[in-house]
Amino acid sequence: MKILVVEDSKFLRVAVERALTRASYTVICAADGEEGLRVAREKLPDAILLDMLLPKLSGQDVLKALKRDPATAAIPVIVLTSLSQKNAKQLEKDGAAAYLEKSTLTLDQGSESILAAVKAVLTDPA
C-alpha cells in the first residue's frame, strides 16, 4: 500500500513517514500543495495524508482538486490540521475521508491515531 504524505513541517513529515514505513506502507512525501497534487496524479497512492496549511496551494484547494480529477477522486484523503473540529464538516463535504487534529497526534507513542485512520480508510468499502 502506497501512502502520500503532504506536510510542510519537516519534523511531522519525517515522523509520520517513519511510523507508516514501520507499519509496512510505502511512503511518498511532498512538502507543499503544488508538489502534493502533482505527486498524487503521478503516483496514484492508495491514501493521502494532507495537511491543510500548506505553502503554494492550500490543503483545502488540493483536496478539492483531487476530488474533481477522475484519476484521483477515489483516493481517500485523511486531513491533518491544527484547525479546530468545527472545520471537519466542511472538510468532509469537500471529500475528506477522515480528519485528525495535529494537537491530538502522539507521534512519540507510535502514531497509533494516524495508523488507525490509514487502516480505516483503506479497508472502508465506501
Image (tube, rainbow, N blue to C red):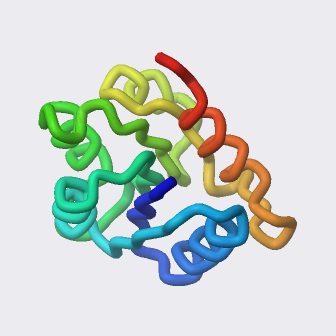
Rendered residue at 55%/53% (across/down): 82
Rendered residue at 42%/41% (across/down): 77
Residue 19 seen: yes
Residue 33 seen: no
Looking at the picture, how far across and down is residue 10, in whole percent?
Answer: 49, 82
* Depth check, front residue: 84 or 32: 32
Query: Which residue appears farthest toward the left when viewing the image?
Result: 69
Rendered residue at 21%/46% (across/down): 61
Residue 61 horizontal side relative to residue 20, left or right = left
Tally of numbered discs:
0
Query: Which residue appears farthest toward the top when viewing the image?
Result: 126
Residue 124 horizontal side relative to residue 96, left or right = right
* Depth check, front residue: 12 or 26: 26
Looking at the picture, how far across and down is residue 8, in whole percent?
Answer: 40, 73
Residue 17 horizontal side relative to residue 94, left or right = right
Q: Is residue 109 above or below residue 105?
A: below
* Depth check, front residue: 59 or 69: 69
Residue 79 horizontal side relative to residue 107, left or right = left
Looking at the picture, how far across and down is residue 74, in whole percent?
Answer: 31, 31
Looking at the picture, how far across and down is residue 17, in whole percent?
Answer: 57, 72
Rendered residue at 16%/41% (across/down): 65
* Depth check, front residue: 33 or 4: 4
The quarter of the picture where residue 108 lies is bottom right
